[in-house]
Amino acid sequence: MKFKYLMLGLACVALSCTKTSEIDRKVDDLLSRMTLEEKIGQMNQLDYGSVNDGLIAAGKVGSVLNCVDAQKVNAMQKVAVEQSRLGIPLLVARDVIHGFHTIFPIPLGQAATFDPALVEQGARIAAVEASSYGVRWTFSPMLDIARDARWGRIAEGSGEDPYLTCLMGQAMVRGYQGDDLSKPNTMAACAKHFVGYGASEGGRDYNTANIPERVLRNVYLPPFEAAAKSGACTFMTSFNDVNGVPSTGNRWLLDDVLRGEWGWDGMIVTDWNSAGELIAHGFASNLEHAAQLSLDAGVDMDMMAYAYISNLEKLIEKGEVKQAQIDKAVRRILKLKFELGLFDNPYVDESFAGSLDYCPEHLEAARKCAVESAVLLKNEGALPIGEGKTLLVCGPLADAPADQLGTWCFDGNPEYTLTPLQALRKYYKVLYEPMLAYSRDNNVSAFPKLRTAASKADAIVLFLGEEAILSGEAHCLADLHLQGAQSELVDYAAACGKPLVLVVMAGRPLTIEEEIGLSDATLYCFHPGTMGGQAIAELISGREVPSGKLPVCFARSAGQYPLYYNRPNTGRPNTGHELLLDQIPLNAGQTSTGCQSYYLDAGYGPLYTFGYGLSYTTFDYANVKLSKTELKPSDVLKVDFDLINTGSYDADEVPMLFVQDVTGSIVRPVKELKRFNRVHLKAGQSQHIRFELPVKELAFYGINDKFALESGEFRLWVAPDAASGEAFNFKVIK
Ligand code: BGC
């Protein structure tokens, strides 16, 4: 039996090697017939609005982004295949970030599911829908670690944790690319933005990032390495500079690390005009110089800067760049086109285009993802609310079909959105008083009506948050309070004397400590997508039980950022000593506040830590046992425990394994997530769970900048979040 599988495995390897070498042969053959001009044309990516038949027929464009009409895709392809000299098909790209037509929660919300299999399914669905229109390349996953919610693009990634981001990124790559890239329903993935973009200083978009190499390697690079290792076909360079070098011109990053150390040989594209922006950075003196720097760094395709198309020939003539550099880049581009099967099947089946959009299976996956992504921050018995009761529904996000879809949602049609208002009407008698028309609305004239309306209701549900336009690229905020008069609305609602439930839909963590304090329950939904309303209504009624967990810390005040649970320890770890502004006596002595690390006005820690999220039930973690307490580098640590659903609802829980390396050659994080698992337990049920952690996964880049395992003492926690659980000790001995 085993032998049979072995032979089958060998046959598969042999088949894929044959396929690869066959593709290599085809690429070589094609390359040998191409003129320099045609080669450079392949390295040029243009927006659909900037492209025309003449350019395509002349072979001056290799990829087009932002065409999502199957007929138009086919029309372009026809010109490329029939009128260009060598008939090389185009590669059509689009930002399919969290769904194509069926919109899933924003990536930060998807991360809150801690459910990579579900995220993979979402990416698969996105690929099925988008590829039916001819889109075969998506600029996703976004793998930027973000520790600052002021940065609008925190919405697009998986949050602050490298391990979670690795797993979510790999899941998306698998989902988009499927098991055989040459099938017409796949898209090539693009790991972006390489690298350090999430560390933009002050949370301001496009800003400089200063990241010591060790931190880069321990925190920012791992998700990209994981994506490279799991076969992501393409990478995109980031807009920012890291330590003074813009990524698009960073040869160390692209050539030494990505291609050299990691042995990845896929195709690298710039971000939109980021080759041209090397000039604004003051890194290149003109576009010709920018083209040279980008090519030298290892960039294969230029998105919308016209740097390659207008300069590479000149640079070759001058001897500034070599033909071999161009051949390498074109080889990678052609290889991807062959792998995607574009030479065999350049056209998309127009009669099939969109036929699976919003189909029941896709909507159900989006609903499930929205359910799992909602995080219950507070519940003092207000939730769930029995069906049939009367709800007063208010707030600017209660019926905002476009806003609940979130940022980077070019193709989702708001007409298909099920809003909370629509969905709640299925289960409740609903009185609807929006009170504010949109999240930034300051018009409070309707507020006095609230009390009378509330008197007729059993509970008030306020839908607050951010419009979609307030997060995402170039939408940073210095102040993370609720916009407009939303906080005042909470004050008014709280004064009505009815149970008050807040549902917040936003692209980032907002600073809403006071509002939560006034509520009886708060459910936080990162913009939840097409089926968000249905998911929320089911969570409110108890048909579903909240199980989302925070993929980022929630701050009390924006001034606390950057804020993250896996911070390096300080020499004066905060022991809970926080004498706040109004507690400091007059004329207090200089050292009376305790000389610990905290803000006088916001304390030390976050409002809610990484991993936090309540349920309608309760869980106990018991009988934690380590397989050994002294381990060798080759060992696998097994951590066993029992998870018990001690409440009265069937529900999911996400136990997490955190580890601390107590003493290292460099200061180590206070905790790091190493494993997690989503488990479903019936009320009263208990389950035995085991996490297995190979000791070698405790290695890191230490004092010598080498990736190594350091022996010594470690602590671990099995816990529902980064602030709970009992510590257990173990040692690594060499
Ligand atoms: C963004 C990328 C995106 C690209 C193409 C840029 O502005 O930074 O994330 O993929 O545009 O639309």
Image (cartoon, rainbow, N blue to C red):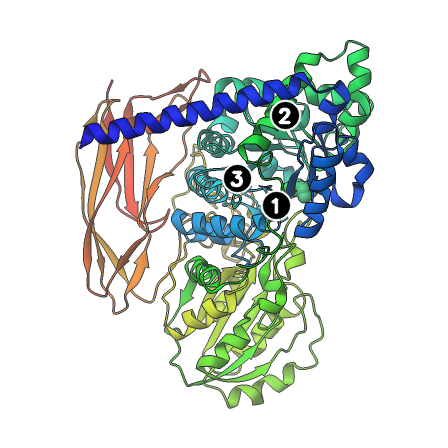
Q: Which quadrant of the view contains residue 499?
A: bottom left
Residue shown at the point (72%, 36%) measured from the top left = 82
Q: Residues within 10 Å of mark 3 (few under 14, many from 20)?
A: many
Q: Quadrant of ligand 1?
A: top right
Labels 1 and 3: the sequence-earlier one = 1
Q: Quadrant of residue 289?
A: top right
Q: Is residue 353 left or right of residue 460?
A: right
Residue marked by disc 2: 243
Alpha-carbon span between mark 1 and mark 3: 27 Å
- Seen in the picture, residue 24 relative to 615 is either above or below; the reply is above
Quarter in which the N terminus is drawn: top left
Nearest the eye: 112 or 6 = 6
Residue 420 horizontal side relative to residue 435, left or right:
left
The amino acid on which the numbered mark 2 sits, given as a three-letter code, is: Asn
Task: Name the residue carrying label 1.
Answer: 135
Return the mark for residue 145. 3
Q: Is residue 162 positioned above or below 218 on the image?
A: below
Percent coordinates x, y for residue 132 in the rendering:
57, 51
